[in-house]
Amino acid sequence: MYKKAILIVAVGIIACLFWFWVKPWIESPARFLEVGIWLKPLIMFAILTSAIGLSFLLIKDYVLKILTSVLAGLPFFFIFGFNQFYLGAFVLMILLFTYGMRNIQAEAGGRTKINIRIIMQRGLPRIVTAMLIMISFAFFFSPNIQASANNKQLPPSFKQVIERTVDSFLEGQVKNLSPQEGQQVKNQTINQIMEQFTVFLGPYIQYLPPILAFGLFLILQGLSFIFVWLAVLVSVVLFWIMKKSGVVRIQVVQKEAEELTM
């Protein structure tokens, strides 16, 4: 029983670290541009989802699995606060976790030989999607996004992207100018583009938070195959460590199987 307790507590601790590190990533305008901002959340995301998947595989008690699911999302409320939308996302996360744990158990129970890679590939996509939903809701209610809608201004991330684009576009065209003149040209270009975007999107800025949150979810979901692959890799390594250390053992048992005939 103590092994199960350690695994459940480990999931809770990893979840605390993940949600703590994902908050600066969510609130940063350069969340996709700077490696130092997204690397730690990505690593912890892979570790957390793999730990959740392994707990669903190794723990047989359904109540303990639900407890593990709750602990994976509970630190979210301490870091991002509480509202009814977060609660709805949390319930949806638990439901998707339940779907994922059933897939893991079905794959594990139907196999004659334990293959962690294949078992995790069956259940981790639902776990990853559940976590991405929570992240998207946190992004929707982040101060920068809500402040942009209230002040009818474009989010800082827009300006970050425009600055990077302008720098790349004008890099060869301002090389003959002095540094001061080159910077002035870049600033004027950026300001003009920002003004045009503000005028064009002005009537719709109040709708930007849900659009941006949904867009972030689509981007992350499109990259989910990478997250699943990383989580599967971490799961294989963690399971190997637990097996070598004697935490888990593989036993050979007799199984009955159904066979179709005509």
Image (tube, rainbow, N blue to C red):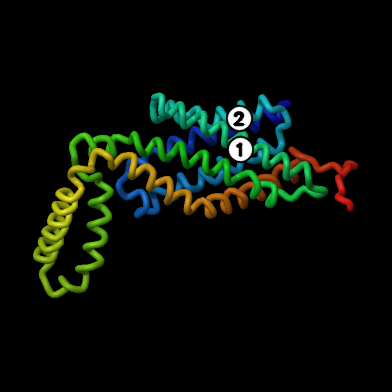
Provide the residue designation for mark 1: 52
Name which quarter of the figure residue 179 lies in: bottom left
Q: Earlier in the sequence, mark 2 or mark 1?
A: 1
Q: Nearer the viewer, residue 155 or 218?
A: 218
Mark 1 falls on what kind of element?
helix
Q: Is residue 197 above or below residue 3?
A: below
Which amino acid is tagged 2? Thr
Name the residue rendered at 25%, 66% in the picture: 168
Q: Residue at x 80, y 49 (%)?
A: 113
x, y percentage for residue 53?
63, 40
Say left or right for 168 vs 220: left
Q: Identify residue type, mark 1.
A: Ile
User: With 58 as the anchor, is 158 left or right in this view?
Assistant: left
The residue sitting at the front extreme is 262
In percent of width and height, residue 178 lies at 10, 69
Tell me the quadrant of the picture where the N terminus can be found.
top right
Pointer 2 local density, CA inside 10 Å: few below 14, some 14–19, many at least 20: many
Residue position for label 2: 68
In-front residue for pair 232/145: 145
**Residue 123 lies in what quarter of the image?**
top right
